[in-house]
Image (cartoon, coloured by chain):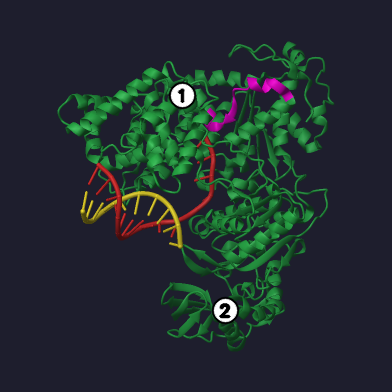
Chain colours: A green, B red, C yellow
Amino acid sequence: MTQLPLSRRHPAEPAPDSPSPRPGGIAARALAGAAPAAPETPYLSGLNPEQRAAVETLEGPLLVLAGAGTGKTRVLTTRIAHILATGRAYPSQILAVTFTNKAAREMKDRIGTMVGDLVEGMPWLGTFHAIGVRILRRHHELVGLKSGFTILDTDDQIRLLKQLLTAENIDDKRWPARLLAATIDGWKNRGLSPKDVPAGEGAVFANGKGGTLYAAYQARLKALNAVDFGDLLLEGIRLFRENPDVLAEYHRKFKYLLVDEYQDTNVAQYLWLRLLAQGSKNVCCVGDDDQSIYGWRGAEVDNILRFESDFPGAAVIRLERNYRSTGHILAAASHLIAHNEGRLGKTLFSEGDDGERVTVTGAWDSGEEARAIGDEIEALQRAGHPLSQIAILVRASFQMREFEDRFVTLGLPYRVIGGPRFYERAEIRDALAYLRCVNSGSDDLAFERIVNVPKRGIGDATLKQIHDVARAARVPLQDAVRVLTESEELKPKVRSTLRGLLDMFARWREQSRVLSHTELAEIVLDESGYTEMWQKDRSAEAAGRLENLKELVRSMEPFENLGGFLEHISLVMDVDNGAGEDAVQVMTLHSAKGLEFDTVFLPGWEEGLFPHQRALDDQGKAGLEEERRLAYVGITRARASARIYFASNRRIHGLWNSTLPSRFLDELPDSHVKVEESRGGMGWGGSGYGGSSYGESRFDRAGGSFGSSSYSTPGWQRAQSQREGGFNAGAGNVGAGRGGARGAHGSTHGSTHGSPPLIEGTLVASSTGAPSTFSRGERVFHVKFGYGEITGIDGNKLTVQFDKAGEKRVLETFIEKA
DNA sequence: TAGATTAACATTTTT
DNA sequence: TGTTAATCTA
């Protein structure tokens, strides 16, 4: 990346509210330095025309529709560099929001390489939430908060709600706190404060108490001088609405606004942004409606679809030139996503080679799938491919285990991305709770968490006593404890433990004046007995937990003081763990967004798993489209090779289920896809794709409403041809590969039913053709489920009550007469 | 109060 | 099947 000439020196910063520099004025010259911002500035020359337009269209609202791999981040960072280089604004006058801390860091780094130290003067580059807190901290008194308010995490939130439910005498079995938390989050995502919640909606939870609970929760937060994540935006919106002068101040401040991943914004974020954008109107949103995969947590694709009407006079620029993937991969992904209806529409193209086709491989079960992928990776490794450029992207995290097991056996280095986050681990949260207690004597939730960790003999009964006193006197729990220990109400033993605990806190607070916060943390963990608790623990993970605690202390080092550290981690829940080692990357499709790899394995493309049944059940067509976008994201992560897998049998919750290939396979264009045999020769034919794929699926019956592909789609026909050729070939392998049971299955198939009728490559489901040879009440046998009795027949699908496995719907072809 | 047993449940995840 | 949280019992 070319360095801008302006990186050498910071210009004098304006006072917060001083007028902005005039374009081309003194500041511009100062910024541009010796090299004036001529039309052909080096940082612009590497851009294609659309990218360049997106960088140079600075005035007024702009939506940049950036398809996968079209240089979105580059546009965003270059745009900021351009604004700075042309002197249109000071670094402190640019608001740049991202969703994740990682994205914010990345953006900052990349701007830094172009602009140098100037990026350090951008306090308003960060996540929605980080910027939200920054604003709230400045004006806390206007939203009824005291300075130093705390930010609750999900855990605290749920514990608080649990208390509320108990107080309201609501059965928290029937109405779990988790559900209430999700409901309230949902409201907050939509920008609704308690009074705005539609009465009907508020009534849904706990027989009409939903709205009341929400209000009570907000009141409790205020009492605790705390906010949750949703409030960081919601209170910001309220602040701006109720205080036009404050809003005006920010209008004057922010000359340019930029938003990354706009398709992921929720309503609250949109409202917040729109308020701020009313000032300069120079708001640039970058996103891709086809990569909106967070609808389930409040993201509104509508925000991006409606941009032009939301921001009148908006320009729209499409980035469609893909620099990442080869032609086949791009074509396959484009055809797939074209099945979605609600989209703005982009046509990605690349100028590179077609490359290799996307492969689709069937496996008998998830074990074979893992083996086949493991083998392929070993082959790639032998051929010299770096493992770090290979990724396995799964729909659901339970799929990861099988791969991990396999890689451990093979001795293949791998790294699981995502999963339980560092700061969410119990030991870390406990340690943090101790530090929070030292930092603030009024952090009730933290106190509650550690009052009996390690075990001190403070049980529910004692805790209730403390609560009662605290509520009566309207004081924090720690103060209540002090009162109690001075009274005679407690048993002597409990009294002295609590006394001791308070003394410890007092001592630590005293020491915090003279010690560094890392030293303090070590002392706290040591003297509280927390470290000792894990040292005594004999369980397997104890050593790891102790290691994590050390890591926690290490991670505190860069911060100035305890308060600074605590503020940071309340917003940044991830930790930069060392990338760079050569290992296969295993992660969910969701966490793969924004990443790219040479080779991408996409296992588990089966109906029910991908698209996930739950998405279909809960969200219907919208859910299906989001799943399809997820599939699109998956394929477009690949630079050179995308390899899709599906298994015919998968164990879900410990029970084996036979599965049907994903409809998304049918939606891939034949000319860009290559069907491969699973290694071992029993994948595609003998192992069930043929068997499991013919006949109607429930989606074919639902066909019209789902807009599902017909039997004439390439994918379907491909399946047919595979089935025909593959089945016989596979039958030979059956006995050898799977043992006796399977052999019996194979022969039954051949002799009893034969293949269903095929007409011109199109399969006619047996519901329209030959009647089933089975009848209700008949005893049957299934390879995985064992013996059972037929309780229902639907086309070529049988409902069988298995003796051991319970009732299941299975394809007739997997069943034989007992 | 603490350990032990058992029942329920089981996408996706950031802040 | 494997985990987690709630409930039971010593």
How far apart are the alpha carbons under marks 1 and 2?
A: 63 Å
Q: Secondary structure at mark 2?
A: loop
Q: Amino acid at mark 2?
A: Gly
In the displayed structure image, the side of residue A113 where residue A693 appears, left or right: left
In-front residue for pair A431/A673 = A431
Residue A519's mark? Answer: 1
Residue A710, given in percent of the width and then of the height, sits at: 65, 69
Direction bottom: furthest residue: A751
Instruction: Identify the image quadrant of the N terminus of chain A.
Output: top right
Q: Amino acid at mark 1?
A: Glu
Horizontal side of A387 relative to A766 (left or right) equals right
Where residue A428 sits, quadrant-wise, is top left
Q: Is residue A107 left or right of residue C2?
A: right
Q: Is residue A245 something that shows in the picture?
A: yes
User: Which residues are the magenta region?
Assistant: A115-130
The location of residue A320, given as percent across then percent down, is 75, 45
Chain letter of the residue carrying label 1 = A
Outermost residue on the left side: it is A488
Which residue is at the front of the view, A532 or A262? A532
Q: Is residue A777 above or below residue A228?
A: below
Residue at figure coordinates x 54%, y 80% from the top left: A741
- Magenta segment, principal secondary structure? helix
Residue A29's place in the image compared with A619, above or below, is above
Give the vertical position of A294 relative to A113 (above or below): below
Task: Look at mark 2 in the image and give the residue it sits on.
Answer: A739
